[in-house]
Amino acid sequence: MKIATLETFTNEWVCFVRLTTDTGAVGWGQTSTYNADITATIFHRQVAPWALGADALSIAPLVERIEEREHKFPGSYRCRALAGLDTAMWDLRGRLEGKPVVELLGGRPRRLRAYASSMRRDITPEQEAERFLRLRDAHGFDAFKWRVGAECGRDVDEWPGRTEAVVPTVARALGAGVAKLVDANSGFSPRRAIEVGHLLEANGIGHYEEPCPYWKLKETKEVTDALALDVTGGEQDWDFGTWERMIEMRAVDVVQPDVMYMGGIARTLKVAQMAAAAGLPCTPHSANLSLVTLCTMHLLGAIPNAGKYLEFSIEGADYYPHQYGLFSGDDPYRVTDGHVTIPGAPGWGVEINPAWLAKARHQRSSLT
């Protein structure tokens, strides 16, 4: 069975991929979000030519071969484009075998604890606490993540004093028995990161994400070594050499690869396996409700070193309008008692909304 056609359906934010074989079988995937229109161009220019005519079920070898063929163009965009092929191939295989991807990976459909993940720094500490409590009462979340510092902020807060205010305000509002996580988005120097880390520990926060510029592994390790709570990171990283260094030097306590930034399930599995061999848990980054969170759900249901929870975006259409209306049928992201359920239908277990596809920019690469 060969790959005969690869199509993309794109706006600036999301790019879905439809793979069709020479037998007419179909699988759906997605490239990484953000600048997805650029990624679609790379997909058709540098991924599709090597994939067309290849074995449609040989996922990891094909991904590796394309990396070799495009070795002069390493980088994030290549991997973001590869994710569209990889995820479409997994969906195809699942549909052909009548199994969800989680079973293809050796796991099973089950419930996953989710943490409510805030993306916002433009609201007050009191507003953040209030919406967390509403989500707790409405959906049963018992784990929450909020933002400190400023994104790549060089020790300058989003506004003066916000970090020192938001940490205790939200922590006190959530109370005991709730998992508390924060994300600094590469915002601090080691000195300031450690200072903030002690504030987090004093307020019962157990997860401290990307405290220093993510590309400065030695700085992150300095923070990890100085604190008792879990320092986490890796969402931006795609290069296996970087992952090897990060894990070998124990720069973080928890690895957080993003399935779409990494280039798909096959490459992300390698990171999870590297982490497992080093005794580190894997809690992937999945910060929006496109296909990435579904792919992550299937992955978490299968790997032995899955972390404590799934990242689950809580942003509404006012903040992330593009993550809505992507799928037809039942909502795959229904939260009950703070948990989501890995779909049990074949492949990823969802269908792309035809109305969304009809409005998207369509591109096609084929053997004929």
Image: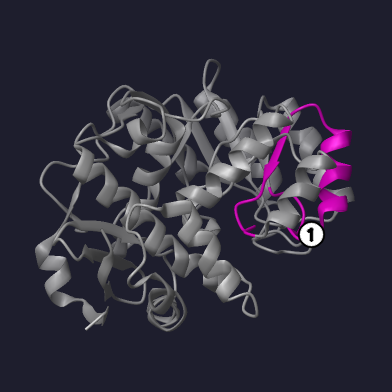
Residue 13 at x, y = what percent? 36, 70
Quadrant location, the N terminus:
bottom left
Mark 1: give few (<14), some (14-19) or many (20+) Cα within 10 Å.
some
**Residue stretch rendered in magenta on the structure:** 210-238
* Amino acid type at mark 1: Asp
Is residue 141 visible to us here? Answer: yes
Is residue 349 visible in the rendered image? The answer is: no
Left or right of residue 69: residue 49: left
Query: Which quadrant holds residue 226?
Result: top right
Q: Is residue 334 magenta?
A: no
Is residue 1 left or right of 206 when viewed as pictured?
left
Relative vertical location of residue 117 with respect to residue 47 in this rendering, above or below: above
Q: Residue at x 54, y 21 (%)?
A: 175
Residue located beneath label 1 in the image: 155
Q: How is the image coloured?
A: one colour
Of residues 253 and 108, which is closer to you in this image?
108
The total of numbered circles placed on residues is 1
Report the residue at 32% width, 23% height from top: 110
Residue at 78% x, 55% y: name it: 188
State which quarter of the image contains the C terminus.
bottom left
- Quadrant hosting residue 249: top right
Question: x and y percent of residue 218 in the render?
Answer: 88, 51
Residue 254 spot, x, y in % from top left: 67, 35
Describe the element under mark 1 as helix, strand or loop.
loop
